[in-house]
């Protein structure tokens, strides 16, 4: 017989399967592809100029490129604005399946200031990013070690070189673009869908046949009527002040077997799956090692201790015992700076909820790369909504620790981490604005962030805190004595600083391989879409933080040191120190950043990331030890 509860579970499962089924692709139901008829217009959009050397994006039209009659900005979400995306229309307009050869876009006379800017951008290896039907422009590059092709996002503004027989280095601009549009045609109609957008940039010093006649001018260096096509850069266009540059392009259309739903596979093709699997196996070995230790403690040592303690009959026998039971009267004594601990735990719970929800949506395919800025937007919105959990967690712990000023703890939870993050973000944004970069967040977006913080996050923290403080306080399983017990002298290996630093090694070791790919995607402008691997690593990180904190907490209590509250938080939280050190190592070994502002940006944002990682891992370790201590002290008889 089917009960209403069973029917509800069946309905929920059906909904889950319906959502998860299409998640294998990169497009969800409701995201409709665009069909183009032959001869239909294909508008090309331009995006920011990017460089891995400076990490400072600029708008496309900050350089003297050809402009359309009117520049129109595309609507951008919050994540795109924070990423520095500035999407605008361009003078390039293709027609579906109608090739064009040697099309003139415009002729531009370069001023001395513009020539200087072009040379700076070429020196700093800036790339031009374009978009066609939501697909980013890529440059195919042959791999040296493999017989395959890799794809680089965007094309370089230009290149440096020397003429044969000279030593003076010159700057050349890529003024001829040979585009290739790949399309998949429907068998039942003449409609087509775009599945690829590539370019081969070339530098050509164009020569005019007769006189300049706008876009209809005949060029001697590039003329489809005379079968003169640009295939190399034998006579490149040098960047010089007061010189004219003619911008041209070709468009080729290539039919492809790739279907629209799989068109992002080329961009997201991972050639290093083995390294990711090695990362997972490495992390699992750490987890198995720690799980074995925890199992030994829980099933053997603790069981034996509890049985022996419960069988003691005389007070003399009890006094002869040593170990974790002897500190039962002090183990739940409120720690110093308990207010700050409650705030940190609440913020950590907020981070945990944000990452868990965001990663579940990402694994299901809701945050695909085709939705630019979607990941960052989702993280911000979920973070704001998780303020409810932050307030609830901090106030529940605060009430257990005999706190009475719940409004004070609520304000600290609502403003401590966001306040620090906002101050650092504001300073870094001012530096970006000083460089006149498009990465500077506009005032309206800054206002929107403050509105999210004060208008939604803070009220939700108050609601959660009120609900948490309203509930009865959690009672410790044992009574706390009035006089604190003296802690005996500890062995050198139980020194707090030593155990804290040791405790952070294993959680960091579980994630550092995957961390390399995350840093590469952020700072080298590459796509990251292996959220399945990332979710596994996240689960392993949670287990590792919990287990290492429990193991070291048990050893600490056995040494009759009952000050476990902060140490359990710092034990797993110290992994953030190793994360920041690894970020510094990555900066000096993998990046080519030379600008001071860019270096400040890198370390500023990595400090914020490390701070967030500290709060997250510290909270996981603390919650595990909190559960562990309540469990073991509720299992023994206390006279």
Image (spheres, rainbow, N blue to C red):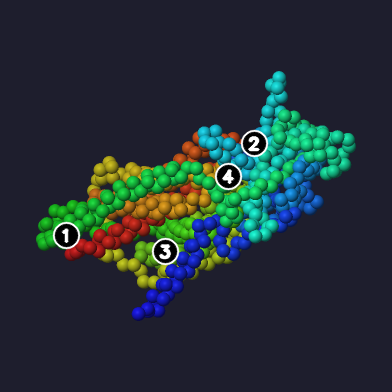
What residue is pinned by disc 3?
393
Pointers 1 and 2 in contact (CB under 8 A)? no
Coordinates of residue 54 in the picture (x, y in percent): 61, 40
Q: How many residues crowd mark 4 within 10 Å: few (<14), some (14–19), many (20+)?
A: some
Left or right: 115 with respect to 404?
right
In the displayed structure, 603 sits above or below 551; it is above
Coordinates of residue 19 in the picture (x, y in percent): 50, 65
- Helix or strand or loop: what does disc 4 sit on? loop
Which circle's residue, 4 or 1, is located before the other in the chain?
Answer: 1
Say which of 339 and 251 sits in front: 251
Say which of 510 and 386 sits in front: 510
What residue is pinned by disc 1?
307
Which circle's residue, 1 or 2, is located before the other in the chain?
Answer: 2
Which circle's residue, 1 or 3, is located before the other in the chain?
Answer: 1
* Residue at mark 3 to residue at mark 2: CA–CA distance: 48 Å
In which image quadrant can residue 599 be found? top right
Closer to us: mark 3 or mark 2?
A: 2
* Residue at mark 4 to residue at mark 1: CA–CA distance: 58 Å
Query: From this viewpoint, is residue 17 visible?
Result: yes
- Helix or strand or loop: what does disc 2 sit on? loop
Say which of 445 and 62 sits in front: 62
The residue under the point 46% across, 66% down is 16
Left or right: 101 with respect to 147?
right
Which circle's residue, 2 or 4, is located before the other in the chain?
Answer: 2
Residue 525: image tag: 4
Query: From this viewpoint, is residue 482 visible?
Result: no
In which image quadrant can residue 252 be found? top right
The residue under the point 69% across, 38% down is 201
Say which of 235 and 527 sits in front: 235
Left or right: 47 with respect to 630?
right
What residue is pinned by disc 2?
124
């Amino acid at each position: 017989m089917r009960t209403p509860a069973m029917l509800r579970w069946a309905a929920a499962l059906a909904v889950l399967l319906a959502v998860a089924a299409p998640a294998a692709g990169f497009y969800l139901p409701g995201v409709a592809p665009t069909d183009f008829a032959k001869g239909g217009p294909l508008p090309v959009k331009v995006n920011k100029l990017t460089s891995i050397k400076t990490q400072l994006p600029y708008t496309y039209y900050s350089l003297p490129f050809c402009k359309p009659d009117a520049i129109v900005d595309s609507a951008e979400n919050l994540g795109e604005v924070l990423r520095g995306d500035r999407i605008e229309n361009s003078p390039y307009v293709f027609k579906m399946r109608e090739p064009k050869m040697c099309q003139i876009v415009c002729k531009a006379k370069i001023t001395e200031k513009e020539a200087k800017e072009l040379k700076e951008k070429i020196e700093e290896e800036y790339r031009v990013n374009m978009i066609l039907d939501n697909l980013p422009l890529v440059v195919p590059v042959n791999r040296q070690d493999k017989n395959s092709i890799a794809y680089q996002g965007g094309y370089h503004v230009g290149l440096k070189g020397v003429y044969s027989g000279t030593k003076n280095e010159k700057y050349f601009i890529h003024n001829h673009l040979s585009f290739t549009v790949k399309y998949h045609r429907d068998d039942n109609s003449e409609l087509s869908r775009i599945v690829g957008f590539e370019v081969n940039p070339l530098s050509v010093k164009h020569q005019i046949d007769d006189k300049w006649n706008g876009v209809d001018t005949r060029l001697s260096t590039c003329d489809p009527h005379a079968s003169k096509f640009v295939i190399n850069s034998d006579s490149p266009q040098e960047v010089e002040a007061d010189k004219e540059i003619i911008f041209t392009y070709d468009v080729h259309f290539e039919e492809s077997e790739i279907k629209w739903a799989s068109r992002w596979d080329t961009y997201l093709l991972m050639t290093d799956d083995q390294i990711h699997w090695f990362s997972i196996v490495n992390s699992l070995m750490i987890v198995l090692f720690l799980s074995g230790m925890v199992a030994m403690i829980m099933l053997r040592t603790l069981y034996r201790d509890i049985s022996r303690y419960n069988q003691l009959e005389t007070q003399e026998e009890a006094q002869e015992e040593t170990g974790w039971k002897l500190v039962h009267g002090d183990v739940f004594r409120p720690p110093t700076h308990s207010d700050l601990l409650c705030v940190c735990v609440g913020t950590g719970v907020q981070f945990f909820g944000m990452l868990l929800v965001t990663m579940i949506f990402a694994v299901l395919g809701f945050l695909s790369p085709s939705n630019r800025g979607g990941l960052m937007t989702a993280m911000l919105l979920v973070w704001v909504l998780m303020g409810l959990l932050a307030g609830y967690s901090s106030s529940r712990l605060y009430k257990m620790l005999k706190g009475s000023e719940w409004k004070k703890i609520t304000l600290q939870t609502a403003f401590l981490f966001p306040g620090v993050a906002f101050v650092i973000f504001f300073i870094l944004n001012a530096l970006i604005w000083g460089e006149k970069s498009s990465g500077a967040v506009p005032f309206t977006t800054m206002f929107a962030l403050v509105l999210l913080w004060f208008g939604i996050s803070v009220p939700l923290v108050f609601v959660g805190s009120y609900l948490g403080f309203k509930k009865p306080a959690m009672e410790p399983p044992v009574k706390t004595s009035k006089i604190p017990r003296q802690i005996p002298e500890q062995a050198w290996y139980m020194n707090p600083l030593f155990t804290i630093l040791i405790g952070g090694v294993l959680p960091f070791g579980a994630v550092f391989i995957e961390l390399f790919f995350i840093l590469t995607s952020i700072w080298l402008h590459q796509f990251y879409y292996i959220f399945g691997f990332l979710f596994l690593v996240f689960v392993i990180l949670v287990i590792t933080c919990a287990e290492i904190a429990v193991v070291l907490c048990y050893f600490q209590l056995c040494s009759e040191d009952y000050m476990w509250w902060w140490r359990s938080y710092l034990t797993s939280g110290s992994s953030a120190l190793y994360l920041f050190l690894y970020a510094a190592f990555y900066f000096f070994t993998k990046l080519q950043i030379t600008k001071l502002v860019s270096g400040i940006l890198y370390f500023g944002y990595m400090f914020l990331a490390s701070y967030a990682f500290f709060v997250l891992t510290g909270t996981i370790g603390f919650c595990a030890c909190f559960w562990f201590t309540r469990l073991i002290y509720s299992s023994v008889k206390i006279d």
